[in-house]
Amino acid sequence: MTKNSTILVTGATGKIGGQVVVQLLGTGAVVRALTRKPDATALPDGVEVVGGDLSDADTLDTALEGVDAVFLVFPTLQADDAAPAVIAKITEHVGRIVYLSAAGVAENPNENAGGIIGSHARVERLIEQSGMEWTFLRPSGFAANTLMWADQIRAGNVLRWFYGAATRTLIHEHDIGAVAVRTLTEEGHGGKWYHLTGPSQLTQGEQAHAIGEAIGRPVRFEELAPEIARQELFGGMPATLVDSILKGQAEMVRHPEPVTSTVKDLTGARARTFQQWAADHASDFR
Ligand SMILES: NC(=O)c1ccc[n+]([C@@H]2O[C@H](COP(=O)([O-])OP(=O)(O)OC[C@H]3O[C@@H](n4cnc5c(N)ncnc54)[C@H](OP(=O)(O)O)[C@@H]3O)[C@@H](O)[C@H]2O)c1
């Protein structure tokens, strides 16, 4: 990529795309951001904001005009219907794509897998077959997933949740953004996939403790039996979705997520700790 290449960032108003936008601005690239609501979006100065909807490939031509590389975030549950036309449309205009996939695909690259992992595997396969130069980022769970605890923690000192011993290698959104920027702007990442994780394993109980440290008051993890959690926390959700959440967490009790050194290998900086993430987001829990 040359210094003033144009890079289209999808998901630009979200957690990861937002990081990619901010960090790309420092590289000299022309940064274009896709959103469904271009008139209601506050993005940093210097970003070209364009409208477009990934559920309708025909809305993407203007956004893709003159683009050298795309960072693709596909809202997962929409991807199965829309992805074939969207990938074909991107391929008409662009030579390089970096796709935000998920770590589960590293462990089970099965297009027939159910749920989110199968969906990411199918999008990866479409991209591999497109002829574009591709890179897949497969991060572990986002540290930002713990924001789902924010209401409980703001309201008191007890977090009622399930599988406190489930052990993850949660990753800071900054680090996924940093790797994305490298893979979008440097040569040598074509045809590669990267399993990205945080620097260490923490149980959910330890994550709650770290949030307590960051906000300056203790947070106690109170273990809920899975069937109580099903009723108390996921009352209105489809049973199959709740089953897959509970099954995934139970699996992480038996098989903690592995740690990789990929963030450091690619960026030169050690992956940020969950404690750092909690400090960066303390105001969300106060
Ligand atoms: N959470 C995890 O632990 C985890 C782990 C690995 C991988 N992932 C993957 O990460 C992805 C989500 O990334 P994120 O958390 O950064 O997203 P996010 O913060 O939830 O933001 C979603 C973004 O998608 C955009 N979007 C939604 N529907 C769209 C559409 N139809 N057309 C165009 N843009 C659309 C939104 O933009 P506008 O509203 O501005 O249009 C927004 O910028 C998913 O694919 C997920 O599977 C998540």
Image (spheres, rainbow, N blue to C red):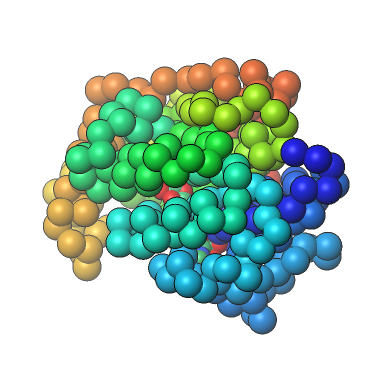
Query: Taking 87 as reference, is 50 left or right?
Result: right
- Residue 210: horizontal and vertical position, in percent? 55, 36
Q: Is residue 165 visible?
A: no
Q: Is residue 4 left or right of residue 279?
A: right
The residue lying toward the viewer, choosing from 132 and 72, is 132
| Whole-percent x, y for residue 197 in the image | 51, 28
Left or right position of 105 against 29: left
Query: Does residue 117 lie above or below 25 as drawn?
Result: above
Find residue 241 and report its image quarter. bottom left
In the picture, the quarter occupied by the C terminus is bottom right
Percent x, y for residue 97? 56, 44
For image coordinates 38% across by 56% down, the residue present is: 83
Tag count in the figure?
A: 0
Q: Is residue 195 visible?
A: yes
Q: State the residue in front, 19 or 238.
A: 19
Residue at position x 30%, y 31% in the image: 109
The image quarter in which residue 50 lies: bottom right
Seen in the picture, residue 9 relative to 203 is either above or below; the reply is: below
Residue 271 quadrant:
top right
Going 45% across and 67% down the picture, which residue do you hit?
57
Q: Looking at the picture, how far across and down is residue 186, in whole percent?
A: 72, 31
Q: Identify the residue at the far bottom of this view.
A: 39
Foreground residue among 151 and 240: 240
Residue that appears at 75% across and 38% down: 1
